[in-house]
Amino acid sequence: MTRTSRSFRTAAVAAVAALGLFATACGGDGDTSDSASDGKPVTLDYWTWTLGAKSTVEAFNRTHKDIRVKFTEIPSGTEGYSKMANAVKAGNAPDVATIEYQMVPEFASQGNLIDLTEYAGETVKSKFPESIQSLVTFGGKTWTVPYDAAPQLYYYRTDLFEKYGVEVPKTWDEFRRVAEKVKKEDKNVRLASMPKSDPALLAALSWQAGGKWFGTEGDAWKAGVNDADTKKVAAYWDALVKDDLVQTFTGWSPEETKARASGKTLSFLGASWSAGGMKTSMPDLSGKWAAAPMPNWGTAASGNYGGTSYGVLKGSDHAEAAAEFITWLTTDKVGVEARLADLESPSSALPANPEMREVAAAKFDTAYLNGQDLYALASEQVDTIVPGWTWGPNQMDVYTAVQDATAKSGFTAGVDAGQEKAESGITERGLKLAK
């Protein structure tokens, strides 16, 4: 990951100044004492949408006497983050929650996170690559602990690609040509679906193309949600939708899954974490899927599509115990194996800690992808993640604006709406907007 380290570090330092985290201790530290006067174990509430969470919690509770974890599944995306932010405001937030990398700056600057430097700072510094550290560390403070890296991957039906006589597209120009051929071969089948409900996917595709939705200039924020590279991506997908070459199913909907399972959708745009869900949503298609690098614009490149970390939300009285649980989740062999052992919701996430990648690869069942080494492919794609991307201080609102406008008028309208929301949100939060 050395290719991206310097750019991520530079962007992170600049973002710190723009967020004002040097001057203010955002993320109120409540009473974090873990003592239990009644002698009972500390109980932690844990909210997440990640696969494998149930078996992970069960394994932790079996092996730890002084800490008990209660698991609650929450929605992913903007709905889940709204739920967490509202819980902080109401004073009933969980102790531990999943925070994707794009939301760490916003949650930290809004005071939703407890500073974990004392409890996990050394772990983050010693166990994770510098490029990953910079996603969770701002202003000399550690806000969350990384779990996985999420380079984009392209998943496709090997049997149906053979049936329709098409090759795996290596570029987006090839992708369009393959989409045209598939539609010509069967008017009821499409190469892929591009959901209008997933701004995180649009962000990853923009990242891959060289777009930069946010940046910093001194102590001011720059907004580029509709910059030239992003506009290129949006126009590309608007054209494919207009020409009826791709579907637009709602992401993770029953309709989307049914189309993939029935062979009406031949491929999809995913990430390293996608494979686990395929095993449960399409169990009858074991051995018929494979993964490949994401098509690109002429040069091997990837964006980060998601990627999770774990934070302690403001109001928790058990930061030390929470950090112990989080450290176990992210750096302990038993914790990683437990996440992969969940047969009901198996995880295929690529651990950010390099030492845990071999553990995950050894445990992950490769039969579904016909023996393909998913972890080797995903690790290679990490090195192609385009450097220089910065997440914004009002990312959740921007995502909502992009999603709403895209649903009504298309991807170009979506990024234009996102740009407007990015600019207004920066100023509304009392931050400087670069001109």
Image (tube, rainbow, N blue to C red):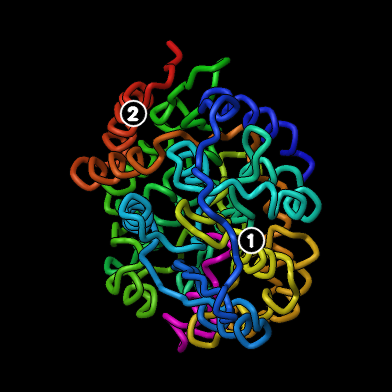
Q: Which residue is at 44% across, 26% downward?
A: 224
Q: Looking at the image, is mark 1 or mark 2 earlier in the sequence? A: 1
Q: How far is the residue under mark 1 from the one under mark 2? A: 34 Å
**Can you say whether 300 is above or below 7 in the image?**
below
In this view, which residue lies farthest toward the left?
408
Which three-letter amino acid code belongs to the residue tagged 1? Glu
Q: Which residue is at 64% across, 55% downward?
A: 146
The spot of residue 186 in percent (x, y) is 32, 69
Mark 1 crowdedness (10 Å alpha carbons): few <14, some 14-19, many ≥20:
some
In this view, which residue lies farthest toward the front?
37
**Can you say whether 284 is above or below 337 in the image?**
below
Task: Specify the segment rendered in magenta.
Answer: 271-290
Mark 2 crowdedness (10 Å alpha carbons): few <14, some 14-19, many ≥20:
some
**Residue that carries the numbered disc 1 in the rendered image:** 320
For residue 307, side relative to residue 397 (left or right): right
User: Could one spot residue 340 in this view of the protein?
Assistant: no
Which three-letter amino acid code belongs to the residue tagged 2? Gly
The stretch drawn in magenta includes residue 285: yes
The stretch drawn in magenta includes residue 57: no
Residue 425: mark: 2
Q: Which residue is at 50% across, 48% downward?
A: 113
The spot of residue 17 in percent (x, y) is 58, 23
Q: Which residue is at 47% across, 21% downward?
A: 222
